[in-house]
Image (spheres, rainbow, N blue to C red):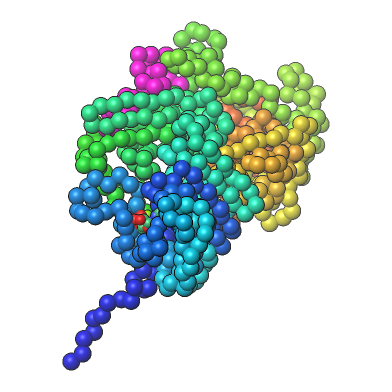
């Protein structure tokens, strides 16, 4: 009889474990950063080549390791952080399973140089696929440098599975950010290829947040600070003017470790409810300090979920603390921010309330009426160059316009398509009422325009670039580094759609031109939306999908808003363009573009 069971060789066991710990270059960055912090470093420099696929190099000035530890640290379950079981329940350092280095060394070529500060000479260890290749004395500064080369060189399936460089780089930026925020007293730098992405001297939390997440936050962060016996809550929330289009700029840290919690996010979102537009997300960086006995310690290194033993109390507390910092506790909203500004006029006031007039507590929304009701939108650009929407000129202009190029620049409007009398009126400056084949059409102008633009842009994918309209004043735009990476990921798509964009120094773009027919005032909104969608769509993007989602975001933000007066001609042109679309019935987001009421329905109602 022979035995079948034997122990896996270490190298294989490590490779299997690596599958859990090391998913992508960003996981390596996270583990090494956490180790450097646990080692007491006051300065950590990160250098990345080729989105971490070729090289991840992290240098710290922490405690360093002895020659023996330098070998030991690559063993599985080798850790200096837990000695007895009790430690497990009081753990406050970042790593503690002693798995990270063993896992990384199983799937990469690693070189580590380290020196204890009190020793004269350090040591360099080279290890590849779990095998020590070389060990030699090393003379260098106190601390540790890891070089992780050719990640997954021995696991081709994993290597092929990695995403494009911009995507992997973005993951690295995310991990870096999640570590650099709570450790704002540590000097961090990050360099990617030839670009200095970050240089972050020790600073206040507020300053660190601004440096990492964007200058637009400067002066717009509200402090949060509260302590009870159970928990301390501190950090910053963005004032309502800095809301985000995507989830992603929301950070929770529990005992300085980044976590995700939909439940707690909900608490904060609730506090912001009356302050920021629907479908946007608040910005926040919140630290919870809590005795580890009240938290289900997250023993898995890659998981970011946690459980609290008294979640409900935490929810209520957090929400009220955030409300307080927004100044919302004693000043309840005067009016619902989202309420239609038209409804009030029913009660005798003819003057419409504009969003800019609304005050909520001490907060006055920063949107000017013009931004929401873009009176200055250039209809000439959109529907033929000769059209002047000024009242009274419609008749004279009509003839010109019928021949003028439409949005697609080809087919002129023909009377046969929609009769002269078909357009009835504009309702609430938002809906086009139209009669067609004995039916009443109620067309949502905003959604209709989205559909028109969407199909126009989509056509660019196969063909040549859409025409670009040069801007009179090129606009420079500065981005947070992660946003910049996201935009660069899709810049070729933007060019196809008719944008002309050039990189201009660090995290800055100059926009020279835009697709014709779009108001330049919309530029920031458009880019914000694109960034939000690219970030949200994240890692699963195939080229076609990505193209479509960029097109969708641009169409959405470029479309004329609701509450915009249109002349009969403009409405007619829009309707014609809409029904020339391949899918006129739905906006790109799936919402219907119009509603039909038939004569039969009306008859049934009245008779
Ligand atoms: P863990 O962090 O869970 O202990 P790791 O595999 O990440 O496990 O690291 C193993 C050990 O190697 C650590 O416990 C620590 O003693 C040592 N070590 C790792 N990185 C460093 C570093 N940058 N400086 C000093 N010691 C380090
Ligand atoms: Mg570790």
> What residue is drawn where x is 39% and y is 22%?
325
Residue 329 highlighted magenta (yes or no):
yes
In this view, the residue in front, 420 or 39, is 39
167 vs 211: above or below: below
Outermost residue toward the top in this view: 348
Residue found at the far front of this picture: 120
In the image, residue 470 lies at what x, y percent?
78, 38
Task: Where is residue 546? Give x, y as percent.
Answer: 57, 52
Name the residue: 66% across, 22% down.
375
In the picture, measured across the screen, residue 406 lies left or right of residue 198, that is right
How many labels sit on residues?
0
Q: Left or right: where does residue 300 sit relative to residue 531?
A: left
Q: Which quarter of the rendered picture does the N terminus lie within? A: bottom left
Q: Quadrant of residue 481?
A: top right
Residue 227 among those drawn in magenta: no
Instruction: Report the front residue among 55 and 513.
Output: 55
Q: The C terminus appears in which quarter of the rendering? A: top left
Q: In x, y percent, where is residue 403?
A: 80, 37
Start and end of the magenta stretch? Answer: 314-338
Task: Say above or below: 254 vs 222.
Answer: below
In percent of width and height, residue 121 lies at 47, 59
| Left/right of residue 4 with respect to residue 342 in the rendered view | left
Q: Using the image as rendered, state which of residue 263 and residue 526 is in the foreground.
A: 263
Q: Identify the residue shown where x is 64% and y is 32%.
A: 522
Side of 569 relative to 253 (left or right): right
Instruction: Residue at 50% x, 17% y: name it.
Output: 364
């Amino acid at each position: 009889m022979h035995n079948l069971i034997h122990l896996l060789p270490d190298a294989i066991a490590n490779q299997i474990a690596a599958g859990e710990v090391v998913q992508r270059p960003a996981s390596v960055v996270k583990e090494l950063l956490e180790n450097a912090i646990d080692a007491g470093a006051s300065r950590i420099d990160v250098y990345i080549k080729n989105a971490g696929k070729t090289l991840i190099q992290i240098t710290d000035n922490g405690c360093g390791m002895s020659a023996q530890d330098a070998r030991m640290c690559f063993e599985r379950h080798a850790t200096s952080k837990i000695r007895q079981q009790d430690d497990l329940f009081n753990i406050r350092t970042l790593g503690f399973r002693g798995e990270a280095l063993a896992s990384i060394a199983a799937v990469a070529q690693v070189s580590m140089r380290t020196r204890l500060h009190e020793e004269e000479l350090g040591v360099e260890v080279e290890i590849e696929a779990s095998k020590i290749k070389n060990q030699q004395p090393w003379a260098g500064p106190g601390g540790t440098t890891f070089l992780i080369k050719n990640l997954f060189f021995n696991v081709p399936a994993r290597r092929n599975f990695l995403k494009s460089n911009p995507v992997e780089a973005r993951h690295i930026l995310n991990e870096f950010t999640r570590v650099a925020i709570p450790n704002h007293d540590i000097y961090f730098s990050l360099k990617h290829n030839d670009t200095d992405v970050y240089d972050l001297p020790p600073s206040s939390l507020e300053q660190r947040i601004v440096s990492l997440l964007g200058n637009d936050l400067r002066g717009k962060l509200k402090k949060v600070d509260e302590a009870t016996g159970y928990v301390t809550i501190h950090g910053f929330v963005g004032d309502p003017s800095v809301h985000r289009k995507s989830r992603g700029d929301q950070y929770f840290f529990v005992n300085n470790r980044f976590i995700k919690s939909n439940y707690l996010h909900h608490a904060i979102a609730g506090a912001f409810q009356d302050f920021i537009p629907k479908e946007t997300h608040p910005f926040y960086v919140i630290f919870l300090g809590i005795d580890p006995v009240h938290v289900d310690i997250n023993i898995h290194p890659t998981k970011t979920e946690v459980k609290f033993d008294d979640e409900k109390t935490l929810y209520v507390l957090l929400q009220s603390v955030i409300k307080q910092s927004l100044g919302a506790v004693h000043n309840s909203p005067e009016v619902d921010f989202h309420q239609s500004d038209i409804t009030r006029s029913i009660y005798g006031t003819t003057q419409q309330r504009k969003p800019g007039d609304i005050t909520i507590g001490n907060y006055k929304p920063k949107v000017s009426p013009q931004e929401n009701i873009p009176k200055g939108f250039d209809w000439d650009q959109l529907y033929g160059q000769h059209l002047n929407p000024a009242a009274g000129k419609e008749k004279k202009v009509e003839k010109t316009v019928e021949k003028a190029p439409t949005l697609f620049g080809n087919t002129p409007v023909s009377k046969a398509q929609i009769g002269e009398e078909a357009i009835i009126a504009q309702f609430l400056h938002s809906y086009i009422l139209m009669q067609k084949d004995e039916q009443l059409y109620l067309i949502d102008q905003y959604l209709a325009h989205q559909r028109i633009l969407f199909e126009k842009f989509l056509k660019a994918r196969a063909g040549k670039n859409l025409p670009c309209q040069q801007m009179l004043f090129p606009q420079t735009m500065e981005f947070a580094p992660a946003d910049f990476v996201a935009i660069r990921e899709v810049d070729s798509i933007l060019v196809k759609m008719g944008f002309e964009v050039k990189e201009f120094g660090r995290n800055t773009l100059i926009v020279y031109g835009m697709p014709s027919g779009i108001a330049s005032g919309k530029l920031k909104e458009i880019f914000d939306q694109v960034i939000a969608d690219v970030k949200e769509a994240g890692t699963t993007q195939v080229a076609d999908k990505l193209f479509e989602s960029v097109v969708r975001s641009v169409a959405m933000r470029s479309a004329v808003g609701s509450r915009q007066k249109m002349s009969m001609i403009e409405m007619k042109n829009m309707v014609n363009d809409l029904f020339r679309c391949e899918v006129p019935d739905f906006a790109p987001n799936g919402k219907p573009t119009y509603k039909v009421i038939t004569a039969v329905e009306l008859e049934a109602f009245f008779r």
